[in-house]
Amino acid sequence: MKENKRRRLTACGAPSLLAISIAALSSPAIAQEALLEEVITIGTRVEGRSATDSAAPIDIVSGEAFVNQGDGDLNNLLRNLVPSYNVNTMPISDAASIVRPANLRGLPSDSTLVLVNGKRRHRAAVISFLGNGVSDGAQGPDISSIPAIALKQVEVLRDGAAAQYGSDAIAGVINFQLKDAAEGGAVEVKHATTNAGDGDQSMVAANVGLPLTGDGFVNFSMEYREQDATSRSVQRDDAAQLIENGNSFVASPAQIWGQPEVEDDTKFFVNSAIELSDAVELYAFGNYASRSTDGGFYFRNPETREGVFATKVLRDEDGDGIPEEILVPLIGDLDASNGIDDCAGFTVAEAHDSNECFSFVEMFPGGFTPRFGGELEDYSMVFGLRGELANGIGYDVSASRGHNRVDFNIYNTVNASLGPDSPTAFSPGSYAQNETNFNIDLSKTTEFAGMPLYLAGGFEWREEEFQVKMGDRASWEVGPLTEQGFLIGSNGFSGFGPEVAGAFERDNIALYSDSELQATDNLRFGAALRWEDFSDFGSTFNFKLSGHYVVSDMLALRSTLSTGFRAPTPGQSNISNVTTAFTDGKLQNLGTIPPTNPIAVLKGGKQLQPEESGSFTLGAIVAAGDWEVTLDYFLIAVSDRLSQSAEQELSDEERAQLVAEGISGADSLNFFRFYTNDFDTKTQGIDLVATYPLGDATDLSFAMNWKDTEVTDFNPETMDDKRIRQLEDGLPNLRGNATITHAGDGWRGLVRLNYYGSYWEAHLDDKDFPLTAGEEWTVDLEGAYDFSESLSLIAGAENLLNNYPDKNPWAGVAGAEYPETAPMGFNGALYYVRAQWNF
């Protein structure tokens, strides 16, 4: 297939609504390509646009930049290259440890729209109930299911684009472009380990391009990866005290903080196209991915964990005549016919000798720490036809189907209400997300008053379905010891019962149009309009205006002004969940219920509505000698922002009502949350990108992102000071990197200096454990030697000097040696070696 023809057809069929070219800047953190490039990007209806024509800032990252790193998770690779992109390790974060939420420009993961080959990527099934504050309750896509070797390049649009692409594009858009070569390929083998000797990562990946008849191509990519767990833990204070008191059954450490173990991480991608005629192309691409994740949970103390080992009673301990609430061992009567008080006053030892009394100390004398994980499956397929009609109208008609599912598992735990009959491993159920899309996109080049005018528009229909599958019976069953104070459901993550399971759907349609007018040789204007109607909350209308003005050969100015929206997902509107979390300084059951539940309504809950946003950017492109510099200011104001509320305390009556509704584990709930639209934020910042050639084979590049988020309005009944501080200071205000690349005769090298600003953390997501961590610097180093034109050996290090974040002052509470939300991670140095064979 002719390369220029394929490029033209792709540009015609892009689903972007903006007719102007969004030309791109090469990311300054790219290992191999640090210069500004002339690149055709998604959303372009006009060929030949260069970086100096850009109306909005875009990072262009080559596929090689992702491959030439030590880590194997695409989220981490993107974080290393784009300073405005943040993702944390998420060591103990419920389902968020399986699909980690990422943040672009300080907004949650579902405020960034993800595309593959310009087509909307389906979101993950995981809802991040524990999302480090910024992404609490977010349901974004699973970027880690994409193999790095499949990527031709990645475009990160740092601009509000909901008027162009629809819901979720408030923070920006990330477009992953797949390789489209019809010949050649590569095989890579990589191994990495940390300086501490744990967290080993082993990976093999391959890519091959083949001709599809004489007028097409099919390009295959695969990756298989394994990742060992790490531990950056200290012994918990309470566990150390148990050991000091003579309990030899307590593990050391009792609770592990580190990256989870990942097994059988398998990824496939295929990309294909074939010309049916000179003006028509048929294309298809899709993926399949699966992996198993296993991580840790919180330690259950054998003397104090309520509902399993202990219970609260009123007793006058000090003899003042006033009974106080104290904890005593929880011992259950196994013979209900004898009454539930027959075991009252028994010691644990006496219960062990009795056939009628039981304590979980018999099963777990040193307490227990549940292990939690899931089996993830992800697949998608896109088919389309694009080309150009005889009258010059370009078209792209496409249909897609995406699926993401996580089957949860939890073990080394119990359903306490079942007593000695409880299993210790459970399948709590699963979440699944299914999405179907149909698009028609049209474009046309014409004239208006002698000036070039580019027009585009189209139609979109999308259906989303969120499914909750029931867990095994033991994970949610109400056992015989319930009335005696023992907790219901698999402890740590209760199973989904029949009342909670179900499918929740919605569909929407959209009409959109855009135009671009080349008013003069130096001045260009653009506009986009979008109307969208959702079956569950009605219609929304948004616009975007843009302009680009060339002042001189050295200076160009650009600006955009837009409105946007983000629709709540069916999962966010309907989900019920019970997990364990630290609240008020101790481990307690925390529930999430639908905002329309009568109990949530009493606390201010109501039917969710879309977030609304306004965005503004103003930038300059400077070419001064050998320097190429872009400087862009951005402002994003989001009203009725969607997130989880602050913890709401439950009364006994409200707790009983949730139990009656079949929410497993609700009998032990002290607090609950629900989704709400009750606050507004303003995020502003500056992005700086610069490149400079130091010599014929040496380049210097620099990137910096500064941002500041302010909560401008909120409902004090559903927002608290902790949540506000997490939103405003939970991510570094300043991040940047500087990179030097050099290529010699048969070898090449890279040195990158990374900076992470200070941040604030509510450790364990608890207001009682605040900490402020200082700024950090890390150094990355890589060297490669080519033994031949085909074979290369590469070695390197991420965080070469083995730097760690500041020590956690609350380490003794739950055993985390470092802040859990450290933006640089907390594993220390990662050393790697990689062999690559190109053919």
Image (spheres, rainbow, N blue to C red):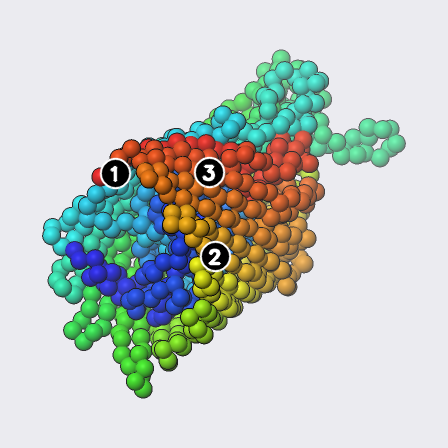
Circle 1 crowding by C-alpha within 10 Å: few under 14, some 14–19, many from 20: few
Tally of marks: 3
Residue drawn at the location 56% of the way across and 60% of the way down? 685
Residue drawn at the location 24% of the way across and 41% of the way down? 185
- Residue 30: mark: none
Give x and y (percent) for residue 557. Answer: 47, 71
Q: Which residue is mark 2?
A: 690
Residue ranking furthest to the right:
320
Mark 1 touching mark 3, by CB under 8 A? no
State how far apart marks 1 and 2 are (Cα): 31 Å
Q: Is residue 349 visible?
A: yes
Residue drawn at the location 37% of the way across and 80% of the way down? 520
Q: Amino acid at mark 3?
A: Leu
Give x and y (percent) for residue 153. Answer: 34, 51
Instruction: Return the residue nearer the eye: 369 or 187.
Output: 187
Residue 668, placed above or below residue 608 = above
State how far apart marks 3 and 2 are (Cα): 20 Å
State how far apart marks 1 and 3 are (Cα): 23 Å
Q: Which residue is mark 1?
A: 789
Give x and y (percent) for residue 191. Answer: 39, 30
Instruction: Return the residue nearer the eye: 355 or 578.
Output: 578
Give x and y (percent) for residue 176. Answer: 35, 52
Answer left or right for 183 relative to 237. Answer: left
